[in-house]
Image (tube, coloured by chain):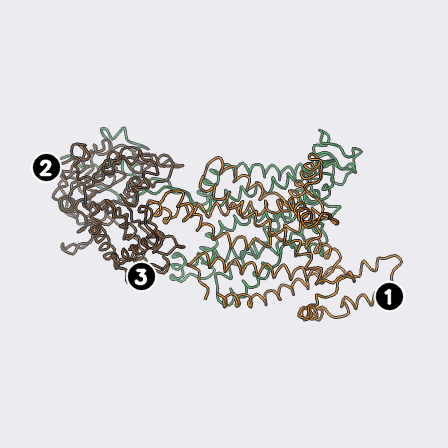
Chain colours: A orange, B green, C brown
Amino acid sequence: MLAYALRRLLISVPILIASTFVVFILSSLAKNPLNALKAKNPPPSPRVLQLEAERLRLDHPLMERYWLWLTGLFRGDFGPSVQSTMNIGDEVVSRFAVTFRLIFLAMLIALILAVVVGVVSAVKQYSGLDYTFTFTGFLFLAMPSFWFAILLKEAGISFNNAVGETVLYTIGDSSVYVTGGLWAEVADTLGHMILPTISLALLSFAAWSRFQRASMLEVLNSDYVRLARAKGLRRGKVMRKHALRTALIPLTTVTALDLGAIISGAIVTEDVFQWRGAGSFLLDAIRGSDVYVIMAWLLVSATFIILFNLIADLLYGVLDPRIRYA
Amino acid sequence: MPDNPKSDIDPSPPQVPETKASGAGETLAGPARTEREFTVAQRSQAQLVLRRFLQHRLAVASLIVLTAIVLLAFVGGALWKYDVGQFTPDESQAPSWEHPFGTDQTGRDMFAQVLRGTQISIGIAVLVALFATIVGTIWGAVAGFYRGWLDTAMMRIADLVLTLPLLAVAAVLGHNVGGTWWLIAVVIAGLYWAYVSRVARGVVLSLREKEFIEASKALGASDARIIFKHLVPNALGSVIVNATILVAIAILLETALSYLGFGVVPPDTSLGLLVSQAKTAVSTRPWLFYFPGLFIILIALTINFIGDGLRDAFDPQQTKVRA
Amino acid sequence: MTPTDPTTATADTVLEVADLTVQFPTDDGLVQAVRGVNYELRRGEVLGIVGESGSGKSVTSLAVMGLLPGSAQLSGSVRFRGNELLESTDKELSRVRGQGISMVFQDPMTSLNPVYTIGDQIAEAIMAHHDIRKDAARRQAVELLDLVHIPHPEQRAKSYPHELSGGMRQRVVIAIAMANRPDIIIADEPTTALDVTVQAQILESLRTAQKETGAAMILITHDLGVIAGQADRVLVMYAGKVVESGSADDVFYRPRMPYTLGLLGSLPRLDVKTDRLTPIAGSPPSVVNMPPGCPFSPRCPLAEEICDTEEPPLEAGSDPDHLGACHFAYRVEGHDPTELFSTAASDATPLPAGTNDGEVR
């Protein structure tokens, strides 16, 4: 299994390099990063512009710039940002730390909800509950993430007004200044996380609960569940030991495949709640044609997606004895 | 011994045994008599699909609602008394008969805006579905049909596109193309074709193992004949269902892009842009926020239901009980 | 007179099915899968149930086990050792399933849970009815595997289903079926999904299981060849009803129903010299909105007017234990299939009652 994991990782490297190359070309074709500088009043001297162009490696041809970036990575150099004071390497770590906190908690909540709702729907197929869950699922699938997030934000504000104090924070990922030690900090962070996490979780939950329902139904109609009943096992035991255990396996793959969509959802959610996470890091970079920031963002999220898919595959092998990695 | 009236039983099942001319047989003549064997009339594939689709009530209702929305946007938008960019003297008005969806702070009629946004959003989504489906289906079908090194090479390229976080790359590209609606469609389609190609390849791979394909190969049919006579008609169901779902996905991605400022930009508008412009006005002028949002939900919801109905119609894993 | 008349049921009877009907509501109408089936099973006997797919033979046995989907509408009576199963709660039924009546299903490839070892799946069956420790149950599982002739049972018990061939898996299912020494083993098409070469071995394993446990067995199949040499008594089912029942010898050599005769004619035989097989023309009737009359009449070479209006009852002739449902049972007796059904060649010998010069493709 270890050999399999290593081989998978090795195969991932060229894919990763190829995709960074594509994105590098695409983002370098964007507007000139010096535009903002040129538009300044009074206009900077040609000497200043030339130095800035050299700092941003614009004096090198495109291919050479990519090569410089790629080789720089091995020295821990992520390249120069348009914002001259920013160290991309340090910034990318702190930004993603904020975002991953959101993503993991949202995924966890979405998974638990999806399994419960999907299994209940399947067991009570065609009941009122099933129809309600199905319709809710379809509704969330059709709901744009930004719209739902804004709606939650408004609801949070109304809630705070009703309670008379700020329980659910609607702006930022944490307060700038918190007094009262560690517990106050934890409470503050959680207060900021609640609404964005719900917003992100409910959107993945919709698709996953539909999937879990289908998977559970397939198992419930399987011959081996019928045989388990024919052995004389009680319904509840068959549900737990035979149906649920087997129906959970395919969800690992789906969760991993949807990670890209969740990262996209996080970008939008962070934008609505004005978090200083990886989302605003990327969006600001795109607006400012900050190529190396875009590249750093892509590198981290693509690596994360690849690793997560690998873990999901390995987990699948552990859960399903039919899969063996040689 | 009387002559047996059924002395010449026809062995082929669909044929109706001859009705008898005398006695009790007469009362049984006609339809009652014909039901003795499996006499279900043969229906063409298209008729079967249509029949099953019409049984899916939610899908049929969704189709009606969606048609109404499309007509409203494309016909109603042209007939409506206010233009999209027209400034009326009524600023920040709540919905009324004059302005069904109210007006914004500069006096623009929201109904006209939402209809225009719907036009653009649907236009982009349909274009995405069309481009991505055509390119993706051909890509996947060719890879799956020929297999070997060509398959490997083509699917590696598709994998490459799939590892890119969609919204991020779309935002980078959307920023570059600068708000032209059909270019945004090309950008989104350029990322989604890879998903379609995976589905198409899977369908073709499973089909080419089927006996009827082997049979026509054994009979010496050309590649073109196999592709167009056998593969395409049989893969059509999955392709249509996927294209439908793709419209809903594309609507959501386009509105998200426009919301973030990397999709459609003013002076033109889309449903996502309208929500973005209204995001600070939810409590003061809620109509600006709710109407475009409801239109997005309604469009995506009805398309998903239609897709669900089509899937059931094309792939009837119906719970028919076997005796 | 019905075979399940309370007076005829003896203390030896383990299972009594009376007037059992099963209906399923579908989009096309009510499907009448089983339309009044009566039979009884005596201790230790092997009952064969024969019929085409759709004749209701599998539904009947699932109804006995209480394993039909919730949408099924049942009526009639199923008595296991005097207890009415149709009125039992699921808890009561769970005690009967596996211990009183156990079942072997058609497809061994899908009958076992892919994520548990076969040893665990057998042990689970034992522990469902006996309060014993897991390691004791696992030892019994290994013994059971040995009984059904699985080589290296000790190691095999640790295998997962996908590591075994279809024939091996079916033996595992048989081992599960005999694990609790049931009174009845129902085998539903146990060999249909398997290679012809392993069919005989599976039938042998079933025989072992039956002898070892002393259970009665219901062997369901569409293949008369499987029944021959196995069954003591045979039921022939058609369109949800029993159309002939009797001892195996009676049904095989002296059929009283044209359908049975047709089934026999479609079997290849080595002991009688024939050039062609004799197929039954047509296909079984739709079980939705069944018309009146005998369901076999459209395919029957003997059919007359009465057959289209009146469904014949299951009646005995000279032998009270040999029942047939045909208005003209007396005319069927003593005929060879080729005399009644046309062979592929159109030179079949004409029969006294109306003949058949139709051509069969």
Disc 3 + disc 1, Cβ < 8 Å? no
**Which residue is tagged 3?**
C154
Q: Is residue B279 left or right of residue C273?
A: right
Amino acid type assigned to the residue bearing label 3 in the image:
Glu
Query: Marks 3 and 2, how far apart in space?
Result: 55 Å
Measured in 3D between alpha carbons, the distance from the residue under mark 3 to the one under mark 1, in whole angstroms, is 85 Å
Above or below: residue C171 compared with residue A10: above
Residue at mark 2: C318
Give the x, y percent position of residue A223: 36, 48
Outermost residue on the left side: it is C318
Which dot, 3 or 2, sits closer to the camera? 3
What residue occupies the far right of the structure in this picture?
Answer: A42
The tag on residue A46 is 1
At 54% from the left edge and 39% from the top edge, which residue is drawn?
A135
The answer to whether the residues at label 1 and label 2 have Cβ atoms under 8 Å apart is no
Q: Is residue B259 visible?
A: no
Residue pictured at 74% horizontal, 49% vertical: A176
Chain identity of mark 1: A
Could you tell whether C295 is left or right of C113 in the image? Answer: left
Packing grade of label 1 (10 A; few <14, some 14-19, many >=20) is few
Identify which amino acid the numbered label 2 is placed on.
Ser
Above or below A283: residue C44: above
- Distance between mark 1 and mark 2 Cα atoms: 119 Å
In the picture, which quadrant includes the N terminus of chain C?
top left
- Discs 1 and 2 lie in a common subunit: no
Give the x, y percent position of residue B257: 67, 50
Q: Secondary structure at mark 3?
A: helix
Q: Position of residue A195 (x, y in %)?
A: 65, 44
Eyeballing the image, is B149 above or below A106?
below
Return the residue nearer the eye: A172 or C302.
A172
